[in-house]
Amino acid sequence: MRSVYRIRWKPGTDVLVGECHCGAVRESEDPVRLWAWLLGHPEGHG
Amino acid sequence: MARTPGPPIVDGMMTTFVRDQWYVAAYGYEVGRELLARTVLGEPLVLYRTEAGEAVALADRCVHRRFPLSESRLDGDTIVCGYHGFTYDPGGTCVSVPGQTRIPRTARVASYPVVERDSFVWIWIGEPDRADESLLPRAPWLADPRYTTVSGMEPLAARYALLVDNLMDLSHETYLHGGSIGTPEVASTPIITEVDEDNGIVHVSRRMADAACPPFYATSTGIDGRITRWQDIEYHPPCLYLLHSRISPAGRLPKEDGTDPDGFHVEVVYAITPETEHSTHDFWAVARDFALDDAEVSDFVRDSNRAVVLQDVDALNILERVIAAEPDCYQELSINIDTGGLAARRMLSQLMAGKPVLAQP
């Protein structure tokens, strides 16, 4: 599996959606905190 | 909203240089039979071409009394120091010293691995044994006859991290470049950002379905009316930045078979080469797949793009002076538009720390 981490900006909102290659997903309005969670894989990715 | 430290510290004990990497030192057309001086990552270099046409990069200081070899002269493929005549071959070995036959064993200057590719002269800064051509990121459009390219290099009196920030967040086009490439849709369109750790690339994609056509594209493509505008960024830290730009009349998309007869494609390439901790070589090139032989379009694209680059240079030079005068503990604010820039910073920080950019299992 390619190790791609993705953040989508939900159109029409201020919400960012972080998607990890492991399938974990989290929403946030703070890109700093969202990258910290996303790139901290696997910690907190359930 | 979390506040984060500003761009990396450059004073004190911390360096922001990433070594053991390929950097663009020059365009191929800049390197010839005249000696060219250029500093990369704080290392003064002299570049030239042998009589056979091979590009050479050596440390720009004579081992004897530090006289710049770039202020000296070529004799065939050797450089003869302009001060006392120490003579160096293309490998940096001293082959002649004045007044004596014995050449000291330590009489040599560093030579740098060089590869010419995609119109650039790339040099390896770091341990020469680690230079691996397969690691070179590519910008093939610049030397592809199916494209016409204009290019230049502007000296930037600012740290390279500021140029990375600038290029990773194109929402600034709306405000800083409003008369040429920016329209309201650039700042208002949501982006998708990806970190590809296996390949060490940050992608930022902004797809505008129905946007105003800025003067830069209206004049160069001849499109009259609204457009579909795609901006797909590929950043290969630390040096190479690619912006794949696609423009078409609004609603005209590539066909299912992969062809794109309604699309105008512009490949914008930057090589971001640190000169010192506070200055950068800002190489820029614009390759297009339309109006290939139209000299007026080439002149327009060159002049317009250079004007945009100089607007960035002016802004970043101001920003450098502001940041250099501040304490290191300044906390800046990041919002959604910064998602790509934050990813680039993190990848650069990993490289600075000497950590391979690899995913955890």
Image (cartoon, coloured by chain):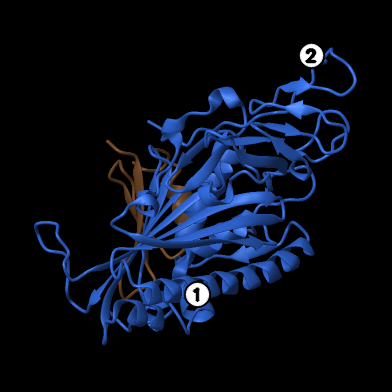
Chain colours: A brown, B blue
How many neighbours does mark 2 have within 10 angstroms: few (below 14), some (14-19), or many (20 or more)?
A: few
Mark 1, secondary structure of its residue: helix
For disc 2, the chain is: B
Instruction: Please give the residue where the numbered disc 1 appears in the rendered image.
Output: B303
Q: Position of residue B271 (x, y in %)?
A: 52, 53
Mark 2, secondary structure of its residue: loop
Residue B268 drawn above or below residue B32: below
Q: Position of residue A40 (x, y in %)?
A: 45, 42
| Mark earlier in primary sequence (2, 1) | 2
Q: Residue at x 57, y 35 (%)?
A: B51
How many neighbours does mark 1 have within 10 angstroms: few (below 14), some (14-19), or many (20 or more)?
A: some
Q: Position of residue B28 (x, y in %)?
A: 52, 47
- The answer to whether B10 appears left or right of B117 in the picture is right
Residue in front for this viewpoint, B90 or B275: B90
Can residue B244 be seen in this snapshot? yes
Residue B154 drawn above or below residue B311: above
Instruction: Please give the residue where the numbered disc 2 appears in the rendered image.
Output: B105
State how far apart marks 2 and 1 are (Cα). Answer: 51 Å
- Circle on res. B292: none
The amino acid marked with disc number 1 is: Asp
Q: Position of residue B352 (x, y in %)?
A: 61, 40
Q: Residue at x 45, y 68 (%)?
A: B170
Residue in front for this viewpoint, B302 or B343: B302
Can residue A31 be seen in this snapshot? no
- Quadrant of the image containing the C terminus of chain B: top left
The amino acid marked with disc number 2 is: Arg
Q: Quadrant of residue B232?
A: bottom left
- Number of numbered labels in the structure image: 2
Q: Are marks 2 and 1 in contact (CB under 8 Å)?
A: no
